[in-house]
Image (cartoon, rainbow, N blue to C red):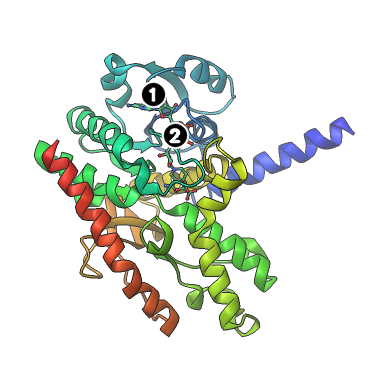
Amino acid sequence: MRTAVYRSLARTAASAKSHLSRRCYSVESAPERKVAVLGAAGGIGQPLALLMKLNPLVSNLALYDIAGTPGVAADVSHVNTRSEVTGYVGEDQLGKALEGSDVVIIPAGVPRKPGMTRDDLFNINAGIVKSLCTAIAKYCPNALVNMISNPVNSTVPIAAEVFKKAGTYNEKKLFGVTTLDVVRAKTFFAGKAKVPVSEVDLPVVGGHAGITILPLFSQATPKANALLSESDIQALTKRTQDGGTEVVEAKAGKGSATLSMAYAGALFADACLKGLNGVPDVVECSFVQSSITELPFFASKVRLGKQGVEEVLGLGPLSDYEKQGLENLKPELKASIEKGIKFANEN
Ligand SMILES: NC(=O)C1=CN([C@@H]2O[C@H](COP(=O)(O)OP(=O)(O)OC[C@H]3O[C@@H](n4cnc5c(N)ncnc54)[C@H](O)[C@@H]3O)[C@@H](O)[C@H]2O)C=CC1
Ligand SMILES: O=C([O-])CC(=O)C(=O)O
């Protein structure tokens, strides 16, 4: 029985590893890449640190938090994969954690409790993100920044303003991580349409909060829309938009999505690393500086390359329901972006 469980775990680890590193190099030929995780001792940070340790594209993994990172780093460092792991704790060590980083992933900050919106996290997380981005501008201004901390619709504009003030802003290198919305939309669509989840693909556009999350089920493949009624699509849309709240309520005061977020964060960081390494045609959805709508930041499909964003892809054809969803989300997303910009300029 035990052996069967170990065998099955080994198979799962091997398939996760091959999923994360598909279209990539052998360990021997992959370039050196340093990834820093800020908030690495948290609910997302710990499993994300483990998943990044499993990624053969990473040669140096820096784990930073205000407390607890020596233990996490010691633990993760025993996993027999390529990267060297170092733990950094407290602001004095932040510079060392960041120096030389190619990708910085930020899951630092407080999570929601039941009854809260992501915007309710603004007052605490805005300051955390601002101070971490100030350090990024100083110690690794060329790194790709993967922003996980909520509210993403505001923390990404905050980061952009901090980098602009420091003279280091490069719109190709700043990403709000919305991959969990895509992961959820794929899972829910596969379940409802009864198609294999591994074959499902679809974009999720807009932002990362409530109605600003707009899954484009009309573009989902495999084409199963004939099997789904308009009310099925509306229910899938609502479930995707409320996916974070579903987890917050189930955890009943013990935080928000951590494990699925770590998976999503690892997928997105892997895509960034592949882009940096010159793998062609790496496309993921992300909340980036954008001109595909009138809003200055917007999540859509993005082609990743050696400099970060290579191309922000358009929305593609929308159903009438999606066109309406797009118009409905704009005022809220605009207000969240403006709130972030205002905070950064006044603090
Ligand atoms: N973008 C997305 O799809 C998602 C975003 N989130 C967000 O991610 C953030 C983190 O969530 P959890 O890991 O569950 O929270 P957590 O509370 O378990 O962990 C946060 C970690 O950040 C650390 N931290 C606080 N201030 C810091 C600072 N100045 N520098 C470095 N580290 C600092 C804490 O010590 C803690 O270890 C929250 O804002 C949450 O809303 C969560 C799920 C999905
Ligand atoms: O809902 C939350 O607070 C965390 C989050 O962003 C998500 O799970 O999508």
Tell me the CA gap for discs 2 and 1. 16 Å
The furthest residue to the front? 115
| Amino acid at circle 1 | Tyr
Residue 99 lies in what quarter of the image? Answer: top left
Q: Which residue is mark 2?
A: 58
* Left or right: 239 as drawn, with respect to 95: right
**Looking at the image, can residue 223 be seen?**
no
* Left or right: 268 as drawn, with respect to 4: left
| Some atom of ligand 1 lies within 8 Å of the CB belonging to the residue at label 2 | no
Q: Report helix, strand or loop for mark 1.
A: strand
Residue at left 51%, top 51%? Answer: 244
Residue at left 41%, top 53%? Answer: 178
Q: List x then y, in percent, for residue 295.
A: 22, 64
How many residues crowd mark 2 within 10 Å: few (<14), some (14–19), many (20+)? many
> Measured along the vertical axis of the image, is residue 44 above or below residue 155?
above
Residue at left 14%, top 35%? Answer: 347
* Left or right: 183 as drawn, with respect to 177: right
In the image, which disc is placed on residue 144? none
| Amino acid at circle 2 | Val
Q: List x then y, in percent, for residue 37.
A: 40, 31
Task: Say which of 212 and 46 sits in front.
Answer: 212
> Measured along the vertical axis of the image, is residue 295 above or below residue 76?
below
Q: Which residue is mark 1?
A: 64
Q: List x then y, in percent, for residue 14.
A: 66, 41
Task: Say which of 122 and 288 sits in front.
Answer: 122
